[in-house]
Image: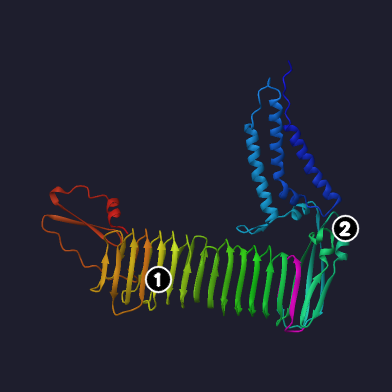
């Protein structure tokens, strides 16, 4: 009797290889076909067909009862399935959703295909009259753009063409077909190219533009791929890039930036700055007016010397700072602010907040993080802090005057200040600090859940009074534990090993 052993797994993988090869062969005859995009969109079909082949195998085995049914999946097939799922997901993320915010790099099917071409470069220049006060528009640029202000009344452009082709002859033919036009209408001048008319929709052509414009020129630059740099111009700047860094320096006017990747640097702006989108590192400083930021940025954010209002909005953080005379550094898990003249307000989560040298109102709402506030001058404006699952530490000078309502639910409180109108309760589930210290002063409201509240005196502390001498026949030994002391007294004839310092630390610290 014959034994039925037919399996169609090998046929399935053979058909898969034939299908993938056919897609890439199709691209050779039709450049409009993008194999990686097709694979990214339709790769789950592999799993569907694999499942169908398994179902057919099972039905075939049922019709031959003399043979044991094959297992649904072998160990190697389970590993293969996991690898397909992971690889297919990664390809879809890279090709269909090309910007990886945290890393700031971009890969798509065009770049993968262009790896098989050679790269050739060509240089050209052109000059056109351009009146001061005009608006220059650069459309659909693919490649980096640099703009520098000058005293001339002309637009001077130096262009470096990077063309990927099979050979130099094909690249030269594409370069000869590439044209540049400066079209003027009512004070608006548009720099255009016919790049899109070239093979592969012009994706094999990258243009590096270095432009000198009259100093009083407003610019509107759109780059689908490439860095943008603007320096020394007096006019509003609107900059958009999908995959590239943006740098704007020494600008008089409004700077508006929209981006979907890369870093941002803005310095020396006499005007306002608006940034939205997503990206990596952000550095903005020496801005005379307001700075407004909306979006998601996964790198380090640095702000310094903002003349008016700094506003920041993201999914996790909402922040407003008035007159940032110092520096603010923010990253995923922390924020540190040194020197703010006006009110400061923040609502965030899972971000440690440290504020030094504040001089105005503070409103802070945070969760699962530590809040540390310190000022070298007595507070003159209200302080409000709401912390969930985190501690709060406020350090102010000894000569401060204030009113306080501080409650730690399921936590503890500590206060370096004491007075007849100041009540400190450390018992129960809601220890608190309430009352007045000094003559009136601002209101301090602090609420914490499952975290300690500490009101400390900043600056040098007054010396502690000397310890009284030990009675005759006794010896006194003191271990310095920082904020408090522990005194051990024992009779001379019964001195033994003193208590462990670790036990003292657990008792006295915090």
Whether residue 59 sits left or right of residue 334 in the image: it is right
Is 164 magenta? The answer is no
For disc 1, the marked residue is 384
**Mark 2–mark 1 distance (CA, rounded to whole Å):** 68 Å
Residue 365 image label: none
Question: Which x, y percent locates residue 286?
Answer: 56, 76
Boundaries of the magenta span: 131-147
Residue 271 horizontal/vertical position (percent) = 60, 80
Image quarter hosting the C terminus: bottom left
**Is the residue 347 above or below the residue 479 in the image?**
below
Residue positioned 66% across, 45% down in the render: 87
Q: Residues within 10 Å of mark 1 (few under 14, many from 20)?
A: some
Please report whichever mark, 2 or 1, sits nearer to the chain's N-terminal start. Answer: 2
* SS of the residue under disc 1: strand
- Is residue 134 shown in magenta? yes
Picture disc at residue 170: 2
Quadrant location of the N terminus in the rendered image: top right
In depth, the one of 7 and 183 nearer the eye is 7
Which residue lies most toward the left here?
Answer: 472
């Amino acid at each position: 009797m014959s034994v039925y052993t037919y399996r169609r797994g090998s046929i399935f993988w053979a058909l898969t290889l034939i299908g993938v090869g056919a897609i890439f062969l199709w691209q050779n005859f039709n450049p409009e076909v993008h194999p990686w995009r097709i694979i990214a969109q339709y790769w789950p079909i592999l799993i569907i067909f694999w499942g169908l082949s398994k179902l057919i195998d099972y039905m075939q085995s049922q019709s031959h009862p003399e043979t044991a049914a094959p297992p649904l999946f072998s160990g190697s097939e389970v590993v293969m399935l996991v690898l397909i799922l992971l690889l297919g997901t990664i390809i879809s993320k890279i090709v269909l959703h090309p910007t990886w915010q945290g890393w700031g790099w971009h890969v798509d099917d065009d770049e993968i295909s262009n790896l098989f071409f050679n790269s050739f470069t060509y240089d050209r220049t052109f000059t056109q009259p351009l009146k001061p006060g005009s608006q220059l528009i650069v459309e659909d640029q693919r490649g980096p753009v640099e703009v520098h202000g000058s005293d001339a009344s002309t637009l001077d452009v130096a262009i470096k063409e990077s063309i990927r082709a099979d050979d130099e002859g094909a690249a030269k033919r594409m370069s000869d077909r590439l044209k540049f036009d400066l079209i003027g209408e009512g004070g608006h001048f548009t720099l255009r190219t016919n790049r899109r008319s070239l093979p592969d929709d012009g994706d094999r052509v990258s243009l590096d533009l270095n432009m000198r414009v009259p100093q009083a020129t407003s610019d509107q630059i759109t780059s689908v791929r490439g860095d943008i740099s603007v320096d020394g111009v007096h006019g509003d700047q609107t900059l958009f890039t999908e995959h590239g860094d943006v740098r704007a320096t020494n600008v008089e006017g409004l700077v508006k930036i929209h981006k979907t990747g890369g870093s941002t640097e803005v310095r020396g702006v006499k005007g306002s700055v608006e940034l939205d989108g997503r990206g990596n590192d952000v550095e903005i400083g020496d801005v005379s007016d307001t700075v407004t930021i909306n979006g998601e940025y996964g790198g380090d954010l640095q702000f310094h010397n903002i003349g008016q209002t700094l506003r920041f909005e993201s999914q996790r953080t909402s922040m407003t700072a008035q007159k940032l005379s110092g520096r603010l550094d923010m990253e995923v898990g922390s924020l540190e602010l040194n020197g703010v003249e006006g009110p400061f307000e923040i609502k965030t989560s899972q971000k440690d907040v440290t504020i030094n040298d504040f001089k105005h109102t503070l409103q802070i709402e945070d969760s699962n993080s530590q809040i540390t506030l310190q000022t070298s001058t007595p507070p003159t404006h209200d302080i409000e802090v709401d912390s969930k699952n985190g501690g709060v530490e406020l350090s102010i000078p000894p000569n401060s005057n204030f009113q306080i309502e501080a409650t730690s639910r399921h936590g503890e409180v500590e206060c370096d200040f004491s007075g007849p109108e100041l009540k400190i309760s450390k018992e129960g589930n809601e220890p608190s600090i309430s009352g007045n210290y000094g003559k009136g002063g601002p209101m301090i409201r602090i609420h914490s859940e499952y975290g300690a509240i500490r009101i400390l005196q900043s600056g040098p502390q007054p010396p502690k009074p000397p310890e009284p001498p030990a009675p005759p026949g006794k010896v006194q030994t003191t271990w310095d534990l920082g904020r408090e002391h522990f005194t051990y007294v024992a009779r001379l004839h019964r001195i033994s090993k003193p208590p462990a310092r670790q036990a003292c630390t657990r008792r006295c610290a915090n």
